[in-house]
Image (cartoon, grey):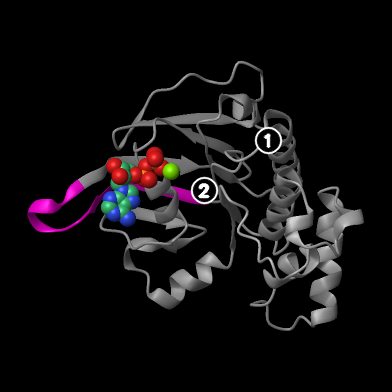
Amino acid sequence: MPAPVVMRDVTYAYGTGDLARPVLRSVSLRIEPGEIVLLTGPSGSGKTTLLTLVGALRAMQQGTASVLGLDLAGASESARTALRSRIGFIFQQHNLLGFLTARQNVAMALELDPGTTEAERLRRAGDMLAAVGLSDHTEKWPDKLSGGQRQRVAVARALVGQPGLVLADEPTAALDKQSGQEVVHLLRDLAKSRGAPILLVTHDPRILDVADRIVSMEDGRIVPADQPKTSSAPAS
Ligand code: ADP
Ligand code: MG
């Protein structure tokens, strides 16, 4: 199986001309099938920028990137849109729609999937919510759920479409220690069981143990980092 993510010598700057300031400098990153990679580093080091490039949420400037087989540097906007639909995104804030129930929020992620009926989408959403431990909460509005429950809905929404890759940006930042750990352990277990690799940006030291590998960034570059203390070698 080819590596789902291969970034080579990626350089990126915001602003143009004299105002251009590189925030990524010759970054190379490779993620193997099923691998869970944590990306850490100080605020402003370029983690979110790198994640949004991998997720085809912004256009490449310099370097090469292959994500789920798509060559990003030469990709059209429609090819990037198609790629995004094969990626599960989880953000710091859950981004659930307040006027939809938990189940409807999850089902919405399947709307681009042609050939599914609404009944089928709602059924799959219910199954996915059960898998994240929320079978008793499927018909609730987001504001009736706790922060940890909302982020579990976001995990269900990211995984329901059987993505080839999961990208998460500070998914525990708004959570207390226990619910943060619950959410990432759940995410890890579900992604592992489906063989989906994860790139997870965090500076939360409490969740580093979920990583197969930790990659550290500083000032737009990847620097050598400590490996996880526990023996969490990639599950085969
Ligand atoms: P991190 O996620 O590690 O905190 P970011 O990738 O968000 O880092 O930001 C890297 C650098 O790029 C920071 O200096 C930040 O201020 C700058 N930056 C981020 N987004 C933008 C933007 N949309 N326009 C201009 N500068 C930005
Ligand atoms: Mg960030």
Residue 7 vertical placement versus 128 (above, below) = above
| Magenta highlight on residue 118 | no
Label 2 sits on what residue type?
Ala
Apparent side of residue 107 relative to residue 227 in the rendered image (left or right): right
Front position in the image: 7 or 93: 93
Q: Residue at coordinates 39% horizontally, 23% vertically from top-left? A: 224
Residue 161 vertical placement versus 15 (above, below) = below
Label 1 sits on what residue type?
Gly
* Residue furthest right in the image: 136
Any atom of ligand 1 within 8 Å of the CB at mark 2?
no
Apparent side of residue 207 relative to residue 46 in the rendered image (left or right): right
| Magenta highlight on residue 9 | yes
Apparent side of residue 191 relative to residue 174 in the rendered image (left or right): right
Which of pointers 1 and 2 lies earlier in the amino acid sequence?
2
- Image quarter for residue 209? top right
Point out the stretch of residues depicted in magenta.
3-21
Residue 197 vertical placement versus 73 (above, below) = above
Name the mark on residue 3. 2
* Residue furthest top in the image: 229
| Horizontal and vertical percent position of residue 168 | 56, 47
- Image quarter for residue 130? bottom right
Q: Residue at coordinates 31% horizontally, 59% vertically from top-left? A: 60
| Horizontal and vertical percent position of residue 136 | 92, 55
> Decide: marks 1, 2 in contact (CB < 8 A)?
no
Question: Marks 1/2: CA distance?
Answer: 28 Å
Front position in the image: 78 or 204: 204
Tell me the quadrant of the picture where the C terminus can be found. Answer: top right
Q: Which residue is mark 1?
A: 180
